Image (spheres, grey):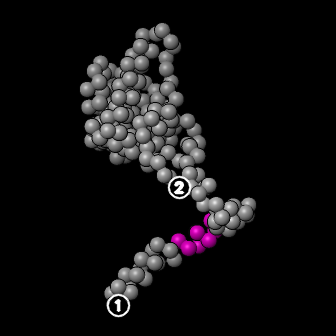
Amino acid sequence: KTKDQLLDDVTKFYAFHRIRPALEQFREGLNTGMIYELLKSHPNLFQNTMCQTEDITSNTLEKLFSIMYSEQGSSKRSIENRIISFWRDFLLDCEDNVTEVTLKDVIIFITAAETVPPLGFSIAPKITFLHDDATLYPKANTCALEISLPTCHSSYDKFKQHMAFGIGNCKDFAFA
């Protein structure tokens, strides 16, 4: 019984008492605008804003990014259209677990965040293209929320292989 009591006390300390001052300060801040009382009386109205409830989907990621295309009608634009088609297929494959990379891995690679914040990112994530670079792998700038896609791939299978390898083996600053 003493062992169980000790385990219970340690759990309570780590789960509540250790962070209690921060929680109380947070509650005081919410009380400033009477938000805390509204939260208590209408928790369902605040759930989507305060809690992450949805999994990331390929559709979510597709809508999240602004694509920085070259001039319409240019040869670069034609290549970019092909690469964006590959990108969309890659996201679907990640969602369907066809690759060893998950959509969560993709968003971490690009933004260093595990999920899309409930109110969105402070800046719009972007997709750019690596035209002047013969690299096979994607590059990301997690501060700018930007992924640069390689344009040297003419087949989806090669694109998918190098994207999965690059994202799956990059656990530091987004250089594959």
Q: Is residue 92 above or below residue 51?
A: above
Amino acid at the residue labelled 2: Cys
Q: Can residue 166 be seen in this view?
A: no
Residue in the foreground of this view, choosing between 139 and 118: 118
Determine crowd level at label 1: few under 14, some 14-19, many 20+ residues with C-alpha closer than 10 A.
few
| Residue 51 tag number | 2
Span shown in magenta: 18-26
Q: Is residue 20 magenta?
A: yes
| Residue 92 tag number | none
Amino acid at the residue labelled 1: Thr
Residue 98 placement, left or right of 38:
left
| Residue 2 tag number | 1
- Tally the marks: 2
Tell me the mark number nearer the camera, choosing from 1 and 2.
2
Residue located at (52% from left, 29% from top): 66
Residue 126 placement, left or right of 138:
right
Q: Is residue 32 magenta?
A: no
The quadrant in which the C terminus is found is top left
* Image coordinates for residue 167, horizontal then vertical, percent: 33, 39
Secondary structure under the numbered disc 2 in the rendered image = loop
Residue located at (37% from left, 34% from top): 91
Residue located at (53% from left, 47% from top): 117
Res 95 quadrant in image: top left
Residue in the foreground of this view, choosing between 89 and 68: 89
Q: Is residue 127 above or below residue 15?
A: above
Gap in Å between the C-alphas at discs 1 and 2?
Answer: 37 Å
Q: Earlier in the sequence, mark 1 or mark 2?
A: 1
* Image coordinates for residue 154, horizontal then vertical, percent: 29, 18
Residue 41 placement, left or right of 63:
right
Q: In this view, does 111 lie above or below 158?
A: below
Residue in the foreground of this view, choosing between 99 and 19: 99
